[in-house]
Image: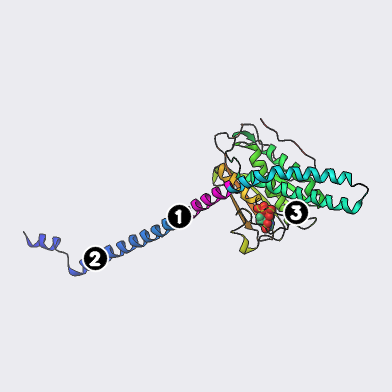
Amino acid sequence: MTTTQAVRTEPDLATILRTYNEVTERLKRSHEALLTEVARLHDELHEKNRELQRRERLAALGEMAAGLAHEIRNPLGGIGLYASVLEKDLADRPRERDVARRISAGVGNLERIVRDILAFAGDADPKLADVRLDGVLDAVLGHAAPAARARMVNLAVDSDLGELTVRCDAGQIERALLNLVLNAIDAVDDGGHVRVRASRRPNELGSVAIVVEDDGAGIAAEHLHRIFNPFFTTKDHGTGLGLAIVHRIAEAHGGSITARNRSEGGASFVLSLPLGRARSNGRKPRNTRGVEIVRGFAPAAKE
Ligand code: ADP
């Protein structure tokens, strides 16, 4: 081995140290990156486990609730019937008739709860069909219009979806959106505003977002993580099942539902739905931006 070769192959101490430091630094960086990734995966796993537990709890709860609801439904129907017969028989005795009327009203409330429980616990498998979203929105807003009118609430739709067709269960999506819109109407003061906005998600062309927002008081911070739980309600006559039903429907469609408070006040719920197989029908989109919902019931337009 020549001297020149020896100089080339034996680096001085400074070079060794520099290389050592570089390698250590690189190792440290990859170690940190690995730790971050492990932490992220851990969080993800934790979240998935929580979601799984939630599903299992809900399935058990749903089964029990459905059993109870079925047992209650028949005798309740009987009580309602007898109360209405009594109400008629007592036409000339106002005090007693008033008692029968209250029984009927109570039965009406219980029937609503039973209906909600059965909707929550019932068959969630969507019957998929190609559905025009503007038709679904028309139907929802048509159904909600009387409640809005009664409280002088300004109900508006703003959609740039045109005649977009989505593969979904129209009945389920109508029900989910109606729950959101009726909640929003409940949440605002008389004369308040509820707006439904529908658009394609900017970063996910394969999905649409339907936003229901209001200018009510918003959702208390301590309630935000509980509102999708079945039977959670802050209303005197609420069943606490409306949002649980929305959550279930969103999941059954492979979509999602989220809630947040708006910085300008009020709440905002976003229902995201994947577009699925059926996409636009190719016709030019019709802009229905800013349509005021003052018309009566309009049946869903199906293709
Ligand atoms: P319910 O309407 O019977 O109470 P939901 O499951 O539909 O049941 O709603 C649960 C709770 O979520 C409501 O009681 C209310 O506290 C809250 N909530 C829902 N929508 C809104 C909204 N738009 N603004 C403020 N709070 C809301």
- Residue 174 against residue 56 in the figure, above or below: above
Q: Is residue 237 left or right of residue 60?
A: right
Q: Nearer the viewer, mark 3 or mark 2?
A: 3
The answer to which of marks 3 and 2 sits earlier in the sequence is 2
Kindly identify the residue that appears in the image at 57 percent across and 46 percent down. Answer: 63
* Residue nearest the observer in this picture, 176 or 204: 176
The answer to which of marks 1 and 3 sits earlier in the sequence is 1
Q: Where the N terminus falls, by quadrant?
A: bottom left
Give the percent coordinates (x, y) of residue 41: 42, 55
Overall secondary structure of the magenta section:
helix
Does residue 81 show up?
yes
CA gap between label 1 and label 3 equals 37 Å
Give the percent coordinates (x, y) of residue 234: 68, 59
Q: Nearer the viewer, mark 1 or mark 3?
A: 1
Ligand 1 within 8 Å of disc 3? The answer is no
Colour treatment of the image: rainbow
Q: Nearer the viewer, mark 1 or mark 2?
A: 1
Q: Is residue 267 left or right of residue 59?
A: right
Crowd band around label 2 with a 10 angstrom C-alpha radius: few (<14), some (14–19), many (20+): few
Crowd band around label 1 with a 10 angstrom C-alpha radius: few (<14), some (14–19), many (20+): few
Amino acid bearing label 3: His
Amino acid bearing label 2: Tyr
Does residue 288 show up?
no
Q: Secondary structure at mark 3?
A: strand
- Residue 302 against residue 185 in the figure, above or below: above
Give the percent coordinates (x, y) of residue 196: 69, 48
CA gap between label 1 and label 2 equals 36 Å
Kindly identify the residue that appears in the image at 69 percent across and 49 percent down. Answer: 113
Q: Which residue has dot 3 on it?
A: 193
Magenta residues, start to end? 43-63
Q: Which residue has dot 2 on it?
A: 20
Q: Which residue has dot 1 on it?
A: 44
